Amino acid sequence: MTTIAVRPSERALEVARALTDIAGAAVRTEPGDASDDEYLRALSAPDVALGVIAVDGSGWDIVRRSGKPVVLVSERVCPGRAIKRVLVPLDGTDESAHAVAESVRLFRAVGAEIIVLHVFDAGTVPGYWDQAAHAREAWEHEFLARYCTPHFPGPAPALTLRTGQPGENVVDVAAEHADMIILGWSQNLESGRARTVRKTVAEAAVPVMLVPQARGLRPSPPLDASSA
């Protein structure tokens, strides 16, 4: 049977149990004193679908090296929360959408609501954005067609747009609308990298699933006025 490997804490175990029905998996509790290397070996077992660990200042070496999704559970997470709404931030690349596609389909299959978030910054907001209402509608339709429809079969998910710092917006939107966040990421923790991931994990009040991005995909060009 498929299993979820948990490095135990009270909150991590509660989140793992909430995921059992969604993933069709059983919870396997790893020793609390297991080293990162020992936990990674357990996580790499063929029957393990994902890991769940507490964030207490450690855990980054695990998610950086893991080839499977890992759910990070901070002290901010409210215990006993059912997972019915899932926030999926997408940066407008095929890599990020492809990375989370399998996980999104899994949650969709059990009836979870999927909320896609895209955050513009000063360099990516379309120049025509404030000119006509239909321009935004056309852009949203194109975004869903390019980055959601090919990866998430079924009805188009709700699309939420924000401007500003991605990490801050992910945390704020999740606080209002989500029970879990799914983020695809490059597993690069060098200086200046993974800022959105770091801020989300540090400040979100819901569990954060980090999914390693598939390598070798070619990024799509960003949407602009001509493509909409």
Image (cartoon, helix red, strand yellow):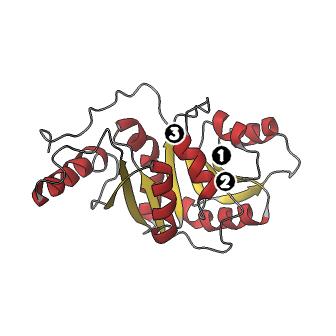
What is the CA distance from the residue labelled 3 to the residue labelled 1?
A: 23 Å
SS state under label 1: loop
Mark 1: few/some/many CA within 10 Å (<14, 14-19, 20+): some
- Seen at 52% across and 57% down, the residue is 181
Tag 3: amino acid: Trp
Sequence-wise, which precedes: disc 1 or disc 2? Answer: 2
Q: Are marks 1 and 2 in contact (CB under 8 Å)?
A: yes
Q: Is residue 124 left or right of residue 47?
A: left
- Say which of marks 3 and 1 sits in front: 3
Q: Nearer the viewer, residue 137 or 217?
A: 137
Name the residue that disc number 2 marks: 3
Q: Secondary structure at mark 2?
A: strand
Q: Is residue 29 left or right of residue 117?
A: right
Q: Is residue 1 visible?
A: no
Q: Nearer the viewer, mark 2 or mark 3?
A: 3
Which residue does the numbered mark 3 point to in the structure image?
185
Which residue is disc 1 drawn over? 47
Residue 93 position by quadrant: top left
Task: Please name the amino acid that badge 1 sits on.
Answer: Asp
- Residue at x 42%, y 41% (from the top left corner): 96
Q: Alpha carbon of mark 1 to alpha carbon of mark 2: how far?
A: 6 Å
- Give left or right: position of 75 versus 154: right
